[in-house]
Image (cartoon, grey):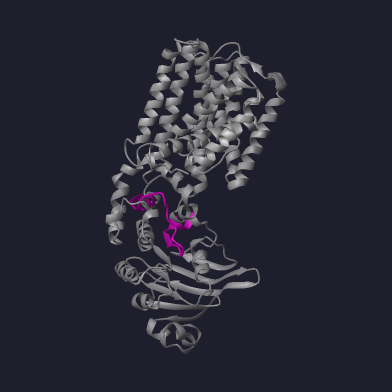
């Protein structure tokens, strides 16, 4: 079996009396799209926050590319190559789409302690940024302020930002949340193109998207992994159908 | 809050406004010959000195959302360096100015490490606390005048050359420093570093997720801002031939914030306009009555309530709807 990019070992998180992440062990191997599904409140976003470092973990380990990153702060994990999108779109509203992405390039291209020279004119930042915008279908909107983009475009912008970081792992927290049917179709197409280039961990409620994209699915319920495996297997699992899929597949 | 729209194009409208401001400053001494020359030069020199501090404050407040309520401490530090060195016979800017910059930078780094761990109101209160510490330290410096302050007998020379001798020469030296400060801050904001600072103001969660340790960038910006305010203090000491703990008082810090807000946050040149409006209004109203603050206070409230974006906002409100 290939060495996993990300490995969670017996990860735990407790909010007061509530065990939100309960002994979660799972991994993401190179090239795969691993989807995490589960009902609201199952602890999916908490899990992503623990992996990206926004939340600390109470117990267990997070191994990334063989390195223990459990104690690293958010920015250090990002520098290791973990890029994420947020459930509630998180962009820089006053910057243009291009500048949002160029900043992501800048984060991983040399130093940001450069006090002179207009960052906006740097081809070394703008060209990779434009390429990322093109991949997510936003090239024509490059000079629009992010605050003025439509909801779907902002979701695509978050993807472009993540791409521009040249990640070794992509964590996507409900990238389709709140998008129209058309926009969802477009985002699925974008993700399908990205698939295989980076390992992706995807949290998504849209089961059409999940079953169209995922190589592997883990079902999270009350902070525990209920089942994990290939989509066909998970879909047929009577426990999963009873606990979650039953309602949403109808 | 008006964002850094000026960073968009190579030469923006904001640059034309700034150019106009500097041309006016450069011409003031000629116009002053027609009237009370010494009075005008002294007043406008004071305006420009506070404009340097206000621009440095706008760098962190307007672009970094770091509302420092202790910025007067840096003015005081720069002024005390000039005063103390002069009292020991070191009256050359080649020594005094670098020392003033180093001392205010170190103070900014030492206090910034603590202040920047906090946010919002806590940041405001902690910067205030540190500046009050500096204020009381200065008040208790009995070898250097304590509460009464310290008189400086001659302005600093520059490599032996009396570059600030006479009000006219001082005026242009101060103008030069204001121009340098403005150009430096303008370049900083457009640079890679400035982009990180502006990004952190909008969304620090996103910046961390991109891999930026926002704290470090904010600390560097805070130090640069403090150093520039220190320079303004050095100039203030030379302009007034006097240093006193009052330079560091919390009222002075508040006035600096008012200047920046009055002129319009996050524009740099707005801070210059704000400083000019504040000091000239203060001077003018004080000519009517000693209770001038009774008039000045409500005026400030009116500007802030009715003109988001300060006087600049008021002007563009009159000039027509703002493009976005």
Residue A211 sits in quarter: bottom left
Q: Quadrant of the C terminus of chain A?
A: bottom left
Above or below A147: residue B143: above
Q: Is residue B76 in sight in this rendering?
A: yes
Segment tinted magenta in the rendering: A75-103
- Quarter that holds the N terminus of chain A: bottom left
x, y percent for residue B90: 57, 15
| A120 with respect to A241 (left or right) | left
Q: Is residue B94 magenta?
A: no
Residue A220: % across, % down: 50, 77
How many numbered tags mark residues here? 0
Residue B117 in view (yes/no): no
**Which picture quadrant has residue A21?**
bottom right
Q: Measured from the top left, where is residue B254 in percent x and y?
A: 60, 34
Say which of A123 and A82 sits in front: A123
Residue nearest the observer in this picture, B26 or B320? B320
The reply to whether the magenta stretch includes residue A101 is yes
Please state the horizontal and vertical placement of residue B246, each as a whole percent of the image.
Answer: 65, 25
Foreground residue, A71 or B159?
A: B159
- Measured along the vertical axis of the image, is residue B255 above or below residue A62? above
Q: Is residue B131 above or below residue B200?
A: above
- B248 left or right of B269 in image: right
> What residue do we see at 53% from left, 18% from top?
B43
């Amino acid at each position: 079996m290939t060495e996993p990019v990300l490995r969670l070992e017996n990860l735990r998180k407790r909010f007061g009396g509530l065990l939100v992440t309960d002994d979660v062990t799972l991994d993401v191997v190179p090239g795969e799209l691993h989807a995490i599904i589960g009902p609201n409140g199952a602890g999916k976003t908490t899990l992503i926050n623990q992996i990206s470092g926004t939340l600390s973990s109470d117990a267990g380990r997070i191994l990334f590319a063989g390195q223990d990153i459990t104690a690293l702060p958010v920015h250090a994990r990002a520098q290791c190559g973990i890029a994420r999108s947020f459930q509630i779109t998180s962009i820089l509203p006053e910057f243009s789409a291009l500048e949002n992405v160029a900043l992501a390039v800048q984060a991983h291209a040399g130093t940001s302690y450069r006090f002179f020279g207009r960052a906006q004119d740097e081809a070394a930042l703008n060209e990779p940024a434009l390429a990322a915008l093109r991949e997510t279908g936003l090239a024509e909107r490059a000079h629009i302020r992010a605050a003025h983009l439509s909801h779907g475009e902002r979701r695509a912008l978050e993807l472009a930002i993540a791409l521009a970081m040249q990640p070794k792992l992509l964590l996507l927290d409900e990238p389709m949340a709140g998008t129209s049917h058309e926009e969802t179709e477009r985002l699925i197409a974008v993700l399908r193109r990205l698939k295989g280039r980076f390992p992706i961990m995807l949290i998504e409620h849209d089961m059409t998207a999940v079953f169209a994209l995922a190589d592997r699915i883990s079902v999270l319920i009350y902070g525990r992994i209920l089942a994990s495996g290939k989509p066909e297997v998970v879909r047929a699992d009577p426990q999963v159908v009873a606990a979650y899929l039953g309602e949403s597949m109808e | 809050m008006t964002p850094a729209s000026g960073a968009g194009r190579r030469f923006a409208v904001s640059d034309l406004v700034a150019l106009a401001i500097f041309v006016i400053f450069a011409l003031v001494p000629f116009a002053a010959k027609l009237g009370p020359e010494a009075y005008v030069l002294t007043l406008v020199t004071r305006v420009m000195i506070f404009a340097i501090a206000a621009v440095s404050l706008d760098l962190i407040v307007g672009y970094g959302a770091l509302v420092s309520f202790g910025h007067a401490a840096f003015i005081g530090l720069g002024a005390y360096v000039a005063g103390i060195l002069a009292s020991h016979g070191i009256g050359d800017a080649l020594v005094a100015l670098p020392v003033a910059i180093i001392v205010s930078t170190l103070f900014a780094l030492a206090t910034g490490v603590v202040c920047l761990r906090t946010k919002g109101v806590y940041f405001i209160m902690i910067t205030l606390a540190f500046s009050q510490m500096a204020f009381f330290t200065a008040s208790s410096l009995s070898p250097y005048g304590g509460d009464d302050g310290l008189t400086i007998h001659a302005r600093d020379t520059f490599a032996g050359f009396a570059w600030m001798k006479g009000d006219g020469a001082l005026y242009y030296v101060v103008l030069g420093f204001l121009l340098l400060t403005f150009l430096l801050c303008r370049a900083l904001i457009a640079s890679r570093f400035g982009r990180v600072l502006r990004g952190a103001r909008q969304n620090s969660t996103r910046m961390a997720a991109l891999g930026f340790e926002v704290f470090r960038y904010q600390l560097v910006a805070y130090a640069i801002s403090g150093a520039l305010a220190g320079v303004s203090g050095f100039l203030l000491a030379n302009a007034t031939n006097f240093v006193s703990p009052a330079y560091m008082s919390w009222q002075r810090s508040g006035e600096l914030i008012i200047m920046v807000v009055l002129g319009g946050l996050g524009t740099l040149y707005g801070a210059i306009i704000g400083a000019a409006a504040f000091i000239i209004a203060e001077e003018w109203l004080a000519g009517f009555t000693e209770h001038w603050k009774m008039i000045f206070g409500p005026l400030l409230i009116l500007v802030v309530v009715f003109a988001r974006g300060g006087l600049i906002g008021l002007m563009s409100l009159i000039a027509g709807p703002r493009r976005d």
